[in-house]
Amino acid sequence: MHFPTILLIALIILTALLIAVFIARPAMTATRAGKILAFVALFLLPLLCMAMGFTSELERSKTTSFCLSCHIMESHGRSLYVDEPGFLAAAHFQNHRVPADEACYTCHTNYAMFGGFRAKMHGLKHVYVQYLGKPPAPEAIKLYDSYNNRECLHCHEARSFEEGAVHTADPGLLAAVKANKMSCLSSGCHQVVHNVGELGKAKFWKGAQ
């Protein structure tokens, strides 16, 4: 358990105890000091607990474990361990090309100005569907929008990308990729991502499990 979580739990317990004291002995509010303490216990501390709790859960929502905590995402989680370099998500996860503990958030966040905010809003919608709606089948899950090359180039626009033999074979390829006119996920390039419908035939890497 992380220190901020322990601090939040301690703060909640303290708040609950103070509120219980004031409920049991309301006469304490007769004095000026009692009124100030009651204000802190009944208003300021609960607000502080809410703010800390919101911040803590917002950070936790970025974690891979949080994304895979829904049953519907189990197959996507398994796809990260496919023992096949052609599986894009697996290759990135297993080789730590993305932070393993924030793999889903790293790849599926839009890196435009409000990308993080949009990712959080989409996450809230997923939670709503999980508990109050009807979740789709894992193989029916689709992206909200076509995957923008910008998200790939956020990490990959480097010398190895610019000078790669495949990328330089066609003079117009690099320009088309950078302009998002040709997707990195095009057929013949990096089209195998999670492919959850094919996991039954896949071999899995057990090195980190």
Image (tube, rainbow, N blue to C red):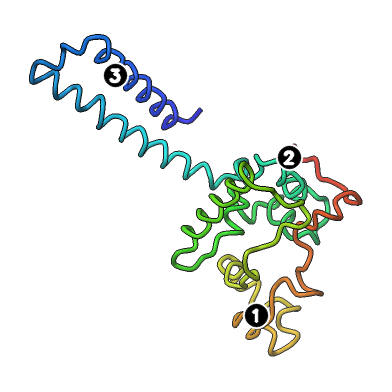
Of the residues tagged 2 and 1, which is closer to the observer? 1
Mark 2 or mark 3, which has the lower sequence index? 3
Quick check: 115 left or right of 14?
Answer: right
- Location of residue 10 (image quadrant): top left
Name which residue type carries label 3.
Answer: Ile
Quarter of the image for residue 209 reads top right
Q: Earlier in the sequence, mark 1 or mark 3?
A: 3
Helix, strand or loop at mark 3: helix
Quarter occupied by residue 65? top right
* Residue hosting label 3: 19
Secondary element type, mark 2: loop
Is 1 displayed left or right of 185 in the figure?
left
Question: Looking at the picture, how far across and down is residue 45, in whole percent?
Answer: 28, 29
Which three-letter amino acid code belongs to the residue tagged 1? Val
Residue at 48% of width from left, 68% of height from top?
A: 112
Earlier-in-chain disc, 2 versus 1: 1
What distance separates the C-alpha of mark 2 from that of mark 3?
A: 47 Å
Where residue 169 appears, as percent x and y from the top left, is 75, 85
Mark 1 vs mark 3: in front? 3
Q: Residue at x 66, y 43 (%)?
A: 68
| Residue extending farthest bottom | 171
| Residue at the right extreme, as displayed | 201
SS category of the residue bearing label 1: helix
- Identify whether 205 is placed above or below 171: above
Q: Nearer the viewer, residue 93 or 182?
A: 182
Location of mark 2 (residue): 208
Q: Residue at x 58, y 65 (%)?
A: 155
Say few, some or many: other residues with alpha carbon within 10 Å of mark 1 (under 14 / 14 to 19 / 20 or more): some
Badge 2 density bin: few <14, some 14–19, many ≥20, Cα 10 Å: few
The numbered disc on residue 177 is 1
Front disc: 2 or 3: 3
